[in-house]
Amino acid sequence: MTNADQLRHAIEQIAAEADTAAVGVAVRDYEHGSEFQLHAERRFHAASTIKVAVLLAVFRALDEHRLQLDDPLHVRNRFLSAVDQTPYRLDADSDGYAPLYKLVGRTAKIGDLADCMITSSSNLATNLLLDFVTVEYAREVLRHAGVSGVDLRRGVDDQKAFRAGLNNETTAQGLCDLFGVLRGDFLSKTSREAAIAILLRQRFDSMLPAHLPSHATVAHKTGEISIACHDAGIVYVPERQPYVVAILTEVKADGAQRRETVAKISRAIFDAIVGTSAP
Amino acid sequence: MSDAPGLRAIDGLQLDDEHRAVLKPGAEVPFADGVVHSLPRFFYEVPSWQAAHEIEVAAHFKLSELLMVDCREAPLQLRQFPHHVPCAIVLLARYLELFRIKAGAPVFVAANGGYRSPSHRLNHRESMHQWATAANIYRVGDTYLDDEAAIQKYARIANSIGDEVFVRPYAQGDDHLHMDIGVVTLTPRELNEVKP
């Protein structure tokens, strides 16, 4: 990346204008083999970006014949806190995909749950899948994949764990590495293509892809909780290799404004990597 | 042929090695109190999922409702047919029918909440689900049994059926009512109990 200083300056300016408390950015461009980092090792609450780690674990388990995507999984709204193993429930009203709660007591296919977890950011689907593959297995997959910057410690919306400070955390570099693993050869070709297809169906497009030209497609996952506002993914542009990007922020501004900040940073990165001539 | 649910009854001891490894017919199970019980030996053979959907094991219960499992079940019982279910499943269904009458509303059994083979990952050695004599009820009518009041209400109704019905006491976070009729095995009259 020849204009790294310009990009760093542009990101810092966008962050300052939005009164951003913290920003972490990591980029890996597969076209030129270059990288860019800005506070890339700072740890953030992972919010829903942790679901990408669960996705990797599910598809690794598929490759290891531990499960099949059309396997049924019992849908229960009952999970055990990582702090003391006491049961807790998720709130359907604050979940990204409330219809899944109608299946409580019955079963859903693992492939459908994986889709829900990413495209609709379903907390229930996430915890069901993580409960099945287990946190220990998912951590082992991350370790085996060489992703050290993503610290998966528990299911989502575990309030007791949150109050105890036991959270899923990530760095921008960790998420960048994780998406790099997803597009590399860690997974089988079939699993890789299926996982990325899910990420390409992402419904929440107000950050990474928002200001990119229409010919760019993005396989990504957002994450928002409290003051954390993140997006990370793989950006595909015709006639060139993709780049992987992770933008993590802590912003006090309301939802729409803070997403706009991430969207602007995404555009600045696109301009620096692909060029400003794009519409 | 057995005339109970319109399914063929078989002696589990005459199944192939693969099925016997999963179903453990007649295997002795030592309980924590030192008592030893034998797992079911006689099974109904369920030829297809469609058959399970069509067969009524009680007036308001299809066989499929008591067979729904997830991928924690052994692959042989999850992905392949025929499935095998202990013959006592018909007794469980009769008790569920009694419970339904007393509750005055449809009764819904959760996935993994009916028969689970001894190889099902959720089973512990004393789980009545491997005798097909237990049911996890997650919903009665429009009421989800996910709080103490709802579970206690229907636990009292289940208990009123008879002393042979066991209802697990409510524990924090429960999302279903567990009821069972204990260790019961059923031998269809046409099958020989002399071991092969």
Image (spheres, rainbow, N blue to C red):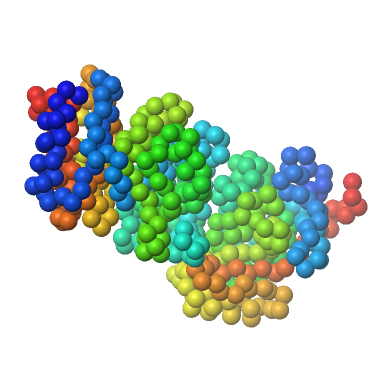
Viewer-side residue, B103 vs A3: A3
- The percent position of residue B150, horizontal first and vertical second, equals 49, 76
- The percent position of residue A201, horizontal first and vertical second, equals 30, 38
Viewer-side residue, B189 vs B66: B66
- Image quadrant for the C terminus of chain A? top left
Q: Compared to A35, does A107 lie above or below?
A: below
For the point 51% across and 44% down, the residue is A137
Residue A19: in sight, yes or no?
A: yes
Viewer-side residue, A247 vs A58: A247
Number of numbered discs on residues: 0
- The percent position of residue B21, horizontal first and vertical second, equals 74, 44
Q: Compared to A267, does A82 lie above or below?
A: below
- The percent position of residue A153, horizontal first and vertical second, equals 43, 51
Viewer-side residue, B68 vs A223: A223
Identify the image quadrant of residue B91.
bottom right
For the point 56% across and 69% down, the residue is B177
Identify the image quadrant of residue B188.
bottom right
- Image quadrant for the N terminus of chain A? top left
Q: Is residue A218 left or right of residue A159?
A: left
Q: Is residue A176 left or right of residue B113?
A: left
Residue A194: in sight, yes or no?
A: no
Q: Compared to B163, does B144 lie above or below?
A: above
For the point 39% across and 62% down, the residue is A164
For the point 56% across and 50% down, the residue is B70
